[in-house]
Image (spheres, rainbow, N blue to C red):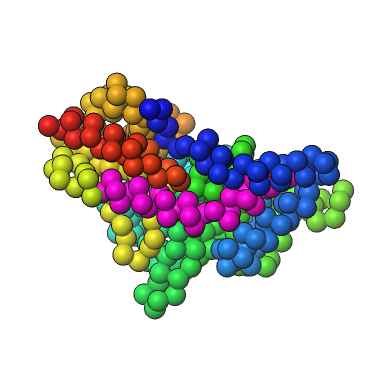
Amino acid sequence: MKIQMVDLKSQYEKIKEEVNAGIQECIDNTAFINGPAVKEFQQEFEKYLNVKHVIPCANGTDALQIAMMALDLKPGDEVICPAFTYVATAEVIGLLGLKPIMVDVDENTFNIAIEGLENYITPKTKAIVPVHLYGQSAEMKKILDFAEKHNLFVIEDNAQAIGSNYTFPDGTSMKTGTIGHIGCTSFFPSKNLGCYGDGGALMTNDDDLAARIRMIANHGQQKKYYHKVLGCNSRLDTIQAAVLKVKLKQLDQYSASRNQMAAYYDENLKGIHEIQVPERAKNATHVFHQYTLKVKNGKRDALQQYLAAKDIPSMIYYPLPLYRQEAFEQYVEEGFSLPVTEKLCSEVISLPVHTEFNQQVSDYIISEIKNFFK
């Protein structure tokens, strides 16, 4: 059988007619930029997230950059972010002349660790970027409290957790990406809500921030040919919006299928002592953008090689801490190290997880993992 990390082909087959009709409508109307589907998707996404403003843009990296531009951060300002995440989170910080302050993560949830954050605060600290890694919310109540104490902006990197709910101690529940000052997401094809190219969006409940974000994403203009600030050109294509409109209606079902596959993995792998299945936070729902195991006793790489020989794909997100990437040398002192991040980079491995649960595929993957550990 042909196994992929994400089965976009099978997913497409189930929504083919509606997707094709949406794309054809864009072509027939020749409204390729800022066509009706963009506004329609924006409004439907706002309703789904229960957020006042969604501002579509070209990709998730742009979303992060525009967020920091909208908050008027200045060169030299410091922004706290996890060291165990995709490069884009810290990359945009450096690109804007800001300084990424990389911190450790929780060993079980993989999200930014709250303990010890006080040690990183300086007069230059202006913002914090929690990443909802692998599909599960960071501990937002503690992050908000910390941010309020130190007068920091909170920018949520929600590229991997669209659809996840976070519940506060008082029982209030909010979608990830709508909790901080600004939320950012990506619609890269493999994401839980992915289009058929590049795409992204920003979310906020602040009217003034929303207006500034829209202006920055549109060359810094509110009125055509009149540019108030230096901005950029970051738009969601109409065709991609048409695809997202269809897939948004399926998002909760996609999350349910991913959870079904994750639960099946859990049940059948829990007896293997050398691996640890993903932990679920009690106050957040997991949408399993990735199903990520921790492999003990230095056997992770050997397991990946074994699975590859059996035509089972897997991925290591992420094999090297951001602070050990050559691109970030200038931001850290020699010898800087974070113990949990270092450990996770040597232990984590992600298995295929699909929006169309296939027990035959799951059984094959599970059986070969068990064979490896026999």
Quick one: which residue is furthest to the top in this view?
Answer: 309
Name the foreground residue: 136 vs 119. Answer: 136
Name the foreground residue: 38 vs 205. Answer: 38
The residue at the point 72 percent across, 51 percent down is 38
The main secondary structure of the magenta stretch is helix
User: In this rendering, would 27 be left or right of 359?
Assistant: right
Q: Judge whether 311 appears above or below 195 on screen.
A: above
- Let me know if residue 75 appears in the view: no
The residue at the point 56 percent across, 40 percent down is 12
User: In this rendering, would 357 be left or right of 107?
Assistant: right
Where is residue 271? Give x, y as percent.
15, 45
- Let me know if residue 144 appears in the view: yes
Where is residue 267? Give x, y as percent.
23, 50
- Which quarter of the figure is the C terminus placed in? top left
Quick one: which residue is furthest to the right in this view?
Answer: 225
Please give the range of residues in magenta: 237-266
When asked about the image quadrant of residue 273, the answer is: top left
